Image (cartoon, helix red, strand yellow):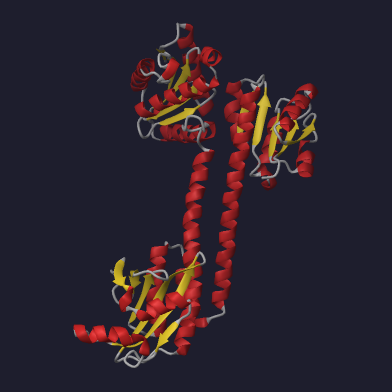
Amino acid sequence: MDRARILIADEDDVLARTISWLLKEQGFDVTVTLGGERVLDALTEHEPDLLMFDVMMRGVDGYDLLHRINADPRWRDMPVLVVSAMPTDEATARLLSLGATDFVSKPFHVRELLARIRMQLRVRQELLHARSALRSTEVELDRVRLEAENRRKIVDILHEVTGDFSSEELYHILVRRVARALDISHCSLVLARPGDQVGVVAAAYEAPGLAHLEIRLERYPEIRAALETGEPVLIEDVDASALYNDVRLDWAAAGTLVPYRSVVALPFRLDGEQAGVIFLRTLLDEASLGRADVEFGDQVVRAAVAAIRRAQVIESTRADKARFEVLALTDPLTQTHNRRALMERLTSELERARRYALHLSVLMVDLDHFKVINDSYGHVVGDEVLRGVSRVLQREARAVDVVARFGGEEFLVVLPETGEEGAVALAERIRARVEETPPVTGGEYGWLRVTVSIGVATVPSTRVNSPEELIAVADEALYRAKAQGRNRVCS
């Protein structure tokens, strides 16, 4: 990947130049603009991969500027990292709602800032790859549809096989539509590669319920020939064809009566390799298949292979897209929800609680003396402590609850349809579990003791009209728990 471009907008010249120097040392391409007046011009001129700016700069409305950047489709995939000295409680929800992807409070730790920048750039790159894959898939869909419109018979088939189907569904659609288009009674799709002894019938028109039936390819010389040569095989008269000389003896010995007049085996490729054949047969009382049928069937197979391959790409792309969406809403350290996902869920749950007159509680969970742990044992141990506490929270929470990392050592747990009594009981259970569960096990840190303080807030409440206010009430309760000696719950 090319060197990531970062634009820094800050009115503090010394700080901006210092950050610029640090980032350039890390291999980034950095541009600095002092103040906020030229941010939009600088974005257009430099097209950065990430924007860092302070919303509290004089002479410009930072919130309005953030809203305008977020509303511009040119910057929809550009992460915006706000670095500001404004209070965290005030900044968090409002900045995220206006389009910021992360917030770092001044003064900051350089290591944390670099980690946040790298994470945002990594997520951006993954999202861009997902968009590119989706665009490529859409282009391929358009191309196949355009080609199909030029063939009167094929268009009817492709209208069905270019739909939103899995590969298995397309196999069944394909054999049904080819059989109907050629007016034949037997059409199946066999998955096999050159040299295979066994093939798998993935779909059969004459037996719609049949799937994954194994067949011995030694009994099907036309399928073996099509796989080995990569060319269609046409047998207009099964009784007279020399291709069946060997198996004809087996048929006679076994007393097998072959009911077919003619046979066509149309090979197809997936990912550059022979993957199977479309196997067409007519019965003794039906007309023989001819060269025109082979040409038509081959065109259908080629188009159908594109549809099958596209279905595989779409299935893979959708899985990747789902993974990227989860990544964008997950805290990478603790694997809990991140702040963005938290605010979306909390807003939804608060609206639901109001609409149906339900209780809703939140727990603000804060590790006691976490700075001492980091200073005494280092950030590696500190990270493991955070992961250990997050595991306790996720084990104790219900499936409907939301566990999120709210700040450095703070977690927020959203409890739908839970009153104050139930929320306090869960908070006490969490507090006890954290105290009795070593978050770091083994080695010289196995004895490390960690405690948490928890603030509880519940609606309905006359003090709460928004998610931010509900969080503020929980934070006030947390402050009381800290003031009363820590390792306790307050509501």
Q: Where is residue 36 drawn, in percent x and y?
A: 77, 31
State which quarter of the image contains the N terminus. Answer: top right
Q: Where is residue 153 drawn, in percent x and y?
A: 48, 82
In this rendering, the answer to whether 218 lies above or below 449 is below
In this rendering, the answer to whether 268 lies above or below 280 is above
Q: Quadrant of residue 126?
A: top right
Q: Quadrant of residue 182?
A: bottom left
Residue 32 as seen in the image, left or right of residue 434? right
Do we see residue 58 in this rendering?
A: no
Residue 236 as seen in the image, left or right of residue 62? left
Depth order, front residue of 317/150 = 317
Residue at coordinates 36% horizontally, 34% vertically from top-left?
399
Number of marks in the rendered image: 0
Residue at coordinates 54% horizontally, 24% vertically from top-left?
407
State which quarter of the image contains the C terminus. Answer: top left
Q: Where is residue 389 drawn, in percent x and y?
A: 43, 23
Do we see residue 265 in this rendering?
A: yes
In this rendering, the answer to whether 46 lies above or below 445 is below
Depth order, front residue of 246/449 = 246
Depth order, front residue of 452/295 = 295
Residue at coordinates 79% horizontally, 29% vertically from top-left?
35
In this rendering, the answer to whether 43 lies above or below 368 is below
Q: Where is residue 85 drawn, in percent x and y?
A: 67, 20
